[in-house]
């Protein structure tokens, strides 16, 4: 039990350092990725990212053809689609393996459904 709590604490610290550390890879962090289906059952690959200058954002590709590409920012970066911090967090957690029922609704909004 104590060992499990130690491992969980260590994972939380590692995740937090990924979010807030800007020194590794010139400030670019791939925080995870996932493939989700929208309401029309089209697949989308979503990469969760954070960089020093762009902040928290998503790279979204139609999958597996990669013909459609979108970017969404939780930190109002340039002309990216705007999402909230909570919406970005949903995808961050989904890429980490946590199933969140809100992900599809957010994805639908981003891809125009």
Image (cartoon, rainbow, N blue to C red):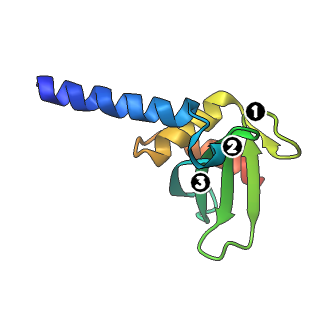
According to the picture, the residue beneath numbered tag 1 turns out to be 75
- Vertical arrangement, residue 113 with respect to residue 82, above or below: below
Which is nearer the eye, 54 or 25? Answer: 25
x, y percent for residue 61: 67, 63
Instruction: Identify which residue is drawn at 88% across, 46% down.
Output: 79
| In this picture, residue 101 sits left or right of residue 28 | left
| In this picture, residue 23 sits left or right of residue 113 | left
Between marks 2 and 3, how big is the CA–CA gap?
A: 9 Å
Badge 1 marks a residue whose secondary structure is loop
If you read the primary sequence from the N terminus, does the residue marked by circle 2 or circle 1 appear first?
Answer: 2
According to the picture, the residue beneath numbered tag 3 turns out to be 47
Badge 2 marks a residue whose secondary structure is strand
x, y percent for residue 2: 13, 22
* Residue 33 is at least partly visible in this image: yes
Q: Are marks 2 and 1 in contact (CB under 8 Å)?
A: yes
Instruction: Identify which residue is drawn at 82% across, 39% down.
Output: 77
Instruction: Identify which residue is drawn at 43% across, 42% down.
Output: 99
If you read the primary sequence from the N terminus, does the residue marked by circle 2 or circle 3 appear first?
Answer: 3
Between marks 1 and 3, how big is the CA–CA gap?
A: 16 Å
Instruction: Identify which residue is drawn at 34% across, 34% down.
Output: 11
According to the picture, the residue beneath numbered tag 2 turns out to be 57
| In this picture, residue 73 sits left or right of residue 5 | right
- Mark 3: few, some, or many residues within 10 Å (few <14, many ≥20)? many
- Mark 1: few, some, or many residues within 10 Å (few <14, many ≥20)? some
């Amino acid at each position: 039990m104590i060992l499990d709590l130690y491992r969980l604490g260590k994972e939380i610290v590692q995740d937090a350092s990924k979010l807030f550390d800007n020194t590794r890879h010139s400030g670019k962090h791939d925080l995870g990725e996932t493939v989700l289906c929208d309401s029309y059952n089209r697949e989308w690959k979503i990469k969760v990212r954070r960089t020093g200058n762009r902040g928290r954002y998503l790279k979204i590709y139609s999958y597996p053809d990669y013909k459609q590409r979108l970017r969404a920012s939780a930190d109002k970066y340039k002309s990216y689609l705007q999402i909230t911090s909570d919406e970005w967090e949903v995808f961050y957690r989904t890429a980490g393996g946590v199933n969140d029922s809100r992900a599809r609704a957010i994805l639908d909004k981003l891809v125009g459904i």
